[in-house]
Amino acid sequence: MRNLLTITIFLWFCIPFFNAVAEKGNDHSKYVQHVEQGFAFMFQGSNQKAISEFEAALTLEPDQAEVLHYLGMAYTQEQFWNQAAESYQRSLALMPDNIEALYSLGVVYFRLDKWADAVPVLERVVELSPQHARGYEVLGKSFVKLRQYVAAVPVLTKALELKPQAAGTYYELGTAQLNLKEYTAAIENFKQALTFGPGRYAEPHYGLGTAYLRLGDREKSRAEMQIYQQLQKEYAEYERLTRLTHAEPKNLEAWTGLATVLMNQQNYGQAVQTFQRCIELAPNNADFHHGLSRAFMNLNYPKHAAQAAKRAVQLRPNEAILYNTLGSTYAMQGDQKNALIAFQKAVELDSEQPYYHLNLSKLYRSLGNQKLAQEHYRAYEHFLSLQKSKQK
């Protein structure tokens, strides 16, 4: 009887312990579910949902450095900079030498204009990982923002050794050298920024204009500043039209203007999407199909370009330029027969356009017909000369 009582009491005291273990196991299972769902939402681009899931997971298990890091990444994607900084700081308190968390925190400080705070964090990044090109890049940019140009130059130079085609880094290095009165070196780096940068990159032209002015070359300075001002106007127009299309999604005039700006900026990927939106609003407008064709051509998608050009020709069958574009799409695909038919039609509709003759000349030459190639090349030179004389 005594042994039975002892066993009963022991089991009675164990019941809360087993319940606690079961409850803890259940909480961890919920934690795992929240984390997995958070990752799924991040991959889907649903960052705010990911934030909710990661926060729920951290409520159950708050000292998870990696989840705190991913929470910071989700906040960063939504540009919630202060919340991102707090998450990265909490992560680093648990794992102080996590290189990517350090780098992420440095970037957030840079975004918050806390450049002095970014510097020691990013210096720790490159100390731990001497080949971390992005760390050197943002560290160098932070030095430029702090006007610490002497410190910026070797850091940005190292960044370019590791990542030699980074247009923005060349621009920042040029800016530092410009402020150090190293004008020749600055000019070289501004030119490199334009070489590797996106089309219509404005800022290096301003740097070049300033450097040339300080070297006393007013003509070159004026030319670069004019380019800069034109590109700034284009960018302002891009911003205005982007806001307008968001506010008025059925405003065809705004979408048309945006498509034109994007083509001028050589932003062909976004131009494709914009022309497609124009076509949704006005499916029988040949100009939109033609613009879509040109954008696809510049992206080296000749089959898609041909489809769009064919539709433009169907809608406006007596427009020479549409046949010329269609011929170019065929030529890109190596379809010489259909290219020849299209180019001939373009010349038939507008025999005084020099570049239609030039295209025919090139095509005949590739086909081995030197006589017709020379004939159309002479026509090209003749009509081009007439055009130039009219412009004078």
Image: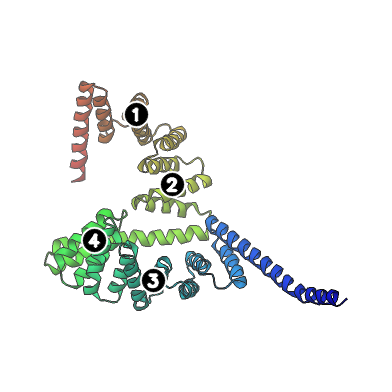
Residue type at the position of mark 2: Val
Which mark lies nearer to you, 2 or 3? 3
Residue that carries the numbered disc 4 in the rendered image: 226
Q: Residues within 10 Å of mark 2 (few under 14, many from 20)?
A: many
Q: Earlier in the sequence, mark 1 or mark 4?
A: 4
Q: Secondary structure at mark 4?
A: helix
Outermost front residue: 2
Q: Earlier in the sequence, mark 3 or mark 1?
A: 3
Is residue 162 in view? Answer: yes
> Marks 1 and 2, how far apart in space?
23 Å
With 2 as the anchor, is 148 left or right in this view?
left
Residue type at the position of mark 4: Gln
Q: Position of residue 13 (x, y in %)?
A: 77, 77
> Marks 4 and 3, how far apart in space?
36 Å
> Marks 3 and 1, how far apart in space?
50 Å
Q: Secondary structure at mark 1?
A: loop
Residue 356 in which image quadrant: top left
Residue type at the position of mark 3: Gly
With 104 as the anchor, is 172 left or right in this view?
left
Q: Which mark is residue 80?
A: none
With 355 as the anchor, is 44 left or right in this view?
right
Q: Earlier in the sequence, mark 2 or mark 4?
A: 4
Q: Which mark is residue 334?
A: 1
* CB-based contact (under 8 Å), mark 3 and mark 1: no
Instruction: Give the residue at x 24% y 22%.
Output: 368
> Marks 2 and 4, how far apart in space?
29 Å
Q: Which mark is residue 106?
A: 3
With 351 as the anchor, is 13 left or right in this view?
right
Which mark lies nearer to you, 3 or 1? 3
Residue that carries the numbered disc 2 in the rendered image: 272
Residue type at the position of mark 1: Gly
